[in-house]
Image (tube, rainbow, N blue to C red):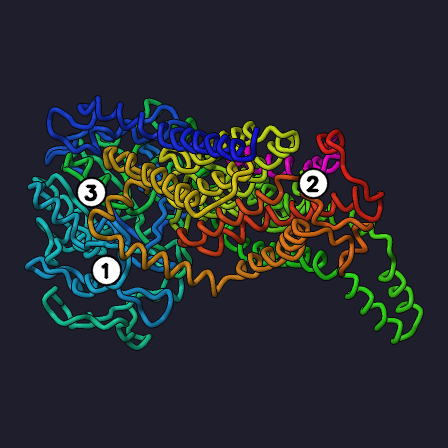
């Protein structure tokens, strides 16, 4: 067969493989779409109720059982929905003795921790009520002193909400496309009768014009008077929203500050200033009495409201929620719901769930708006950030369920302070490893340091100089190989450590860090001491394989290990709660590419390049589907990075040279597959969409530019303000110095074992490593392509290549040091036979 025929045959194979990969990527998402189109009736109800309510039974995660959802049209004026709002109340504040009213309601209903993250790191009372009003993150204008919030004045007699222009101005300045007044406008358009009791409730039910939709009433701080006010206001209304007050931390009071444009204000008045001026401290409304007293006062008002509801509308559904933080520290708040519109399971106990988190017992404040509208049977506006509540069966007793929610919150609180030091240590350890490999093995530097020690004189200096001049690197290489594998095992160890209840220990930080180190050493021991220990790529296969499998299993079972873990998600931040977050995606991408390298290396060495490309295609398709499927990984930025990485790896495995035309084909396949993930998700009912479908809705609503600017700003902030940038740069420098340059040099000429690192190779050039690991070079290219694109298309930017580096580079160091131990100065420089290579 001539060389021309051989090249044509390779091109045909590459084309067929690319078509098969593209079909495999798109088909899993086209088939559900076709089935959904064939059965359109599943998306509507005969009564014309909203798709959110009608399809709520499908909104619970498939991993859970016993889910019950809110029926459409269950709320009427005779059986109203009563939303009781407070701020600063957490589950650990509740007990049967101190807060009997809230405690009793929690025993009867479905409960959860609620993430109240708003525009800023901590949420003020106005922010929480605005989230209910807008269905998105919205906030009051910031105060001069961090952690201080404005008090909410009552609505005027004509229903005008004081400070509304400030809220609109703050929403316009933020990048979350919030529309304060959306809930009020929607209720008014649907003809729902509603009443707001208290200043926060007036904010929640205000229309976009700044006036309360429906009726409004003043809320007394006296529990007795509040009960009478609710009893008088509730009849004849399908929805009642009641503000029962706030709980604030000491030295974090609510401050009475007039609107920047004058109080009260309306939207047509002048633009508000960015930061209202604080009054003198003696004018502050709240001096923060003991927390227990504040919570008891809130509970008394809740009890008065519940008594009034039982008397006036015994068939009402009650939703009690704490909408904001009590100070400058972001913490999850309490929420519970009971009544016919939010049924619990027959056992009488349940956890609240929502598709925005897919974590039973964890919801977000932005879920309240679609929940309220769904209970009322009102069509939910497209583009809301949240999803309606559902109740998921929980076998615990009422007190045990509250204890569980307290434990989950404690887990989230304890991990928050440990993440920063961990990442600092991760960067330091990796850079130390890179430094030892790059500088500590440099012969010129070792000799220069030895000469300076000899010039200093002394016994100790002479002994150190002799050690540095030693030409026997075996102990050092073995130590480096072991250290590299341990460092590479740290990421997977952080997830394994979350299987342990470390947050309940007397010293949670010591317990978590200790467990992570022990587990990393254990994983490294398996990689280095197993029966496969003599194979060159064994450490990579074990560590990367375990990382990939663990993350895949975790994302398939609800991403429980990622929540409140060192390299996972922090619930208080209000980011990703399910699927692959940026850190887990980086590890998954790096580990799956490395696994593909280990699986295909022996095939390529034996000349079975087509089979190797097929294996890469299978691994790539599985990884991409797991990452991008809306019901699994739900990662919009993942497939655009994964697909080209695996396509490039497959083409290089087949020996196909990359050209601009082929690169264009790779990018086209990537674009089609990536967009299909989001479009298919968008075509589902609003209540069933993940953030992929909501992104398409945002684009159609004209919000693409705000999303781009927000993500670009975050990308630049991470690039210039994160220590992880050092990790990424250090890893790139090490790969270039240790592998890329020697491999490129070895392709051009045989340079032997000269240079600063020649003493390690026993006459072999390190560039010859690709004779024993032929897929090493293609893997470096694939990793570079994947993380370059990931850096460009994700808001976390440099974080993605940095996290990927923390896994990939140490394992590549282990490959190099392992090769040096086998073919360097400890072994005769002989060419590897096919039989020897296949065993590695």
Furthest residue in direction front, as rendered: 2
User: Which marked residue is nearer to the observer: mark 1 or mark 2?
Assistant: 2
Would residue 505 be seen by someone viewing this image from the given angle? no
Quarter where residue 577 is shown: top left
Q: Counting other residues with Cα less than 10 Å from the Cα at mark 3, is it few (<14), some (14-19), or many (20 or more)? A: few
The answer to whether the residues at label 1 and label 2 have Cβ atoms under 8 Å apart is no
Q: How many marks?
A: 3
Label 1 – label 2 distance at C-alpha: 60 Å
Q: Is residue 17 above or below residue 712?
A: above
**Residue on which disc 1 sits:** 171
How far across and how far down the image is residue 666, in percent? 42, 41
Q: Quadrant of the C terminus?
A: top right
- In the image, 831 versus 274, the foreground residue is 831
Q: What residue is shown at x 91% (from left), y 74% (from top)?
A: 457
Label 2 – label 3 distance at C-alpha: 57 Å
Numbered circle sitting on residue 382: 3
How far across and how far down the image is residue 375, in percent? 19, 35
- In the image, 826 versus 203, the foreground residue is 826
Q: Earlier in the sequence, mark 2 or mark 3?
A: 3
Would residue 723 be seen by someone viewing this image from the given angle? yes
**Magenta stretch, overall SS:** helix
Quarter where residue 231 is shown: top left
How far across and how far down the image is residue 520, in percent? 66, 43
Magenta stretch: includes residue 552: yes
- In the image, 833 versus 670, the foreground residue is 833
User: Which marked residue is nearer to the observer: mark 2 or mark 3?
Assistant: 2
Q: Is residue 530 left or right of residue 18?
A: right
Q: Which residues are magenta?
A: 524-553
The answer to whether the residues at label 3 and label 1 have Cβ atoms under 8 Å apart is no
Q: Is residue 384 left or right of residue 364?
A: left
**Residue on which disc 2 sits:** 771
Q: Earlier in the sequence, mark 3 or mark 1?
A: 1
């Amino acid at each position: 067969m001539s060389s021309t025929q051989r090249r044509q045959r390779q091109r045909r194979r590459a084309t067929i493989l690319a078509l098969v990969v593209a079909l495999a990527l798109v088909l899993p998402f086209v088939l559900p779409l076709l089935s959904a189109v064939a059965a359109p009736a599943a998306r509507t109800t005969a009564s014309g109720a909203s798709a959110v309510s009608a399809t709520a039974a499908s909104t619970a995660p498939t991993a859970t059982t016993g889910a019950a959802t809110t029926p459409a049209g269950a709320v009427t004026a005779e059986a109203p929905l009563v939303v009781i709002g407070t701020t600063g109340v957490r589950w650990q504040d509740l007990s049967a003795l101190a807060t009997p009213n809230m405690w009793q309601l929690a025993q009867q209903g479905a409960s959860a921790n609620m993430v109240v993250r708003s525009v800023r790191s901590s949420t003020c009372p106005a922010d929480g009520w605005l989230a209910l009003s807008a269905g998105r993150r919205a906030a009051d204008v910031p105060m001069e002193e961090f952690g201080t919030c404005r008090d909410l004045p009552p609505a005027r007699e004509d229903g005008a909400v004081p400070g509304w222009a400030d809220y609109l101005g703050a929403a316009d300045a933020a990048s979350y496309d919030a529309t304060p007044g959306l809930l009020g406008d929607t209720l008014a358009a649907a003809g729902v009768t509603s009443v707001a009791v208290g200043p926060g409730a007036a904010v929640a039910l205000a229309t976009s014009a700044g006036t309360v939709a429906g009726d409004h009433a003043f809320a007394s701080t006296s529990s007795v008077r509040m009960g009478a006010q609710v009893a008088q206001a509730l009849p004849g209304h399908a929805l009642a929203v009641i503000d029962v007050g706030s709980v604030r931390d000491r030295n974090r009071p609510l401050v009475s500050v007039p609107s920047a444009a004058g109080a009260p204000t309306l939207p047509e008045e002048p633009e508000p200033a960015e930061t209202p001026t604080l009054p003198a401290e003696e004018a502050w409304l709240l001096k923060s009495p003991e927390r227990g007293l504040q919570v008891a006062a809130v509970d008394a008002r809740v009890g008065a409201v519940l008594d009034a509801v039982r008397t006036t509308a015994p068939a009402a559904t009650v939703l009690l929620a704490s909408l904001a933080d009590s100070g400058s520290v972001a913490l999850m708040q309490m929420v519970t719901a009971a009544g016919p519109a939010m049924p619990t399971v027959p056992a009488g106990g349940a956890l609240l769930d929502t598709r925005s988190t897919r974590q039973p017992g964890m919801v977000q404040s932005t879920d309240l708006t679609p929940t309220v509208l769904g209970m009322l049977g009102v069509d939910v506006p497209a583009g809301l950030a949240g999803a309606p509540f559902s109740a998921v069966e929980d076998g615990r007793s009422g007190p045990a369920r509250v204890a569980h929610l307290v434990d989950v919150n404690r887990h989230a609180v304890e991990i928050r302070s440990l993440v920063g030091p961990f990442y600092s240590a991760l960067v330091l350890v990796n850079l130390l490893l890179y430094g030892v490999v790059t500088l500590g093995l440099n012969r010129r530097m070792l000799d220069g340091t030895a000469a300076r020690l000899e010039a200093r004189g002394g016994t100790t200096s002479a002994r150190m100089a002799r050690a540095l001049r030693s030409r026997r690197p075996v102990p050092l290489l073995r130590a480096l190989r072991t250290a590299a594998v341990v460092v590479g095992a740290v990421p997977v160890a952080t997830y394994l450590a979350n299987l342990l209840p470390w947050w309940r220990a007397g010293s949670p930080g010591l317990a978590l860090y200790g467990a992570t180190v022990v587990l990393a050493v254990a994983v490294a021991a398996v990689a280095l001491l197993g029966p496969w220990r003599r194979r060159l790529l064994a450490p990579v296969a074990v560590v990367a394989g375990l990382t990939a499998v663990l993350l895949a299993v975790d994302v398939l079972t609800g991403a429980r290990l990622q929540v409140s873990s060192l390299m996972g998600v922090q619930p208080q931040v209000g980011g990703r709660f399910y699927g692959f977050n940026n850190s887990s995606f980086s590890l998954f991408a790096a580990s799956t590419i490395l696994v593909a390298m280990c699986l295909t290396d022996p095939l390529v060495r034996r000349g079975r390049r087509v089979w190797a490309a097929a294996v890469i295609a299978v691994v790539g398709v599985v990884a991409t589907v797991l990452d991008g499927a809306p019901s699994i990984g739900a990662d919009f930025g993942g497939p655009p990075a994964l697909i080209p990485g695996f396509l490039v790896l497959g083409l290089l495995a087949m020996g196909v040279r990359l050209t601009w035309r082929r690169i264009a084909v790779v990018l086209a396949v990537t674009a089609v597959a990536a967009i299909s993930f989001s479009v298919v998700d968008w075509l589902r009912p609003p209540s069933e969409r993940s953030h992929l479908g909501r992104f398409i809705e945002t684009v159609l609503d004209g919000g693409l530019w705000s999303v781009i600017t927000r993500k670009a700003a975050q990308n630049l902030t991470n690039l210039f303000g994160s220590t992880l940038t050092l990790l990424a740069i250090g890893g790139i420098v090490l790969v270039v110095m240790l592998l890329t340059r020697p491999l490129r040099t070895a392709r051009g000429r045989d340079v032997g074992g000269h240079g600063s690192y020649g003493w390690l190779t026993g006459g072999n050039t390190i560039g010859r490593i690709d004779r024993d690991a032929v897929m090493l070079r293609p893997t470096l290219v694939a990793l570079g392509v994947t993380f370059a694109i990931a850096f460009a298309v994700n808001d976390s930017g440099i974080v993605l290549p940095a996290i990927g580096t923390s896994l990939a580079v140490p394992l590549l160091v282990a490959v190099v040091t392992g090769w040096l131990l086998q073919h360097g100065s400890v072994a005769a420089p002989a060419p590897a036979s096919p039989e020897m290579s296949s065993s590695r």
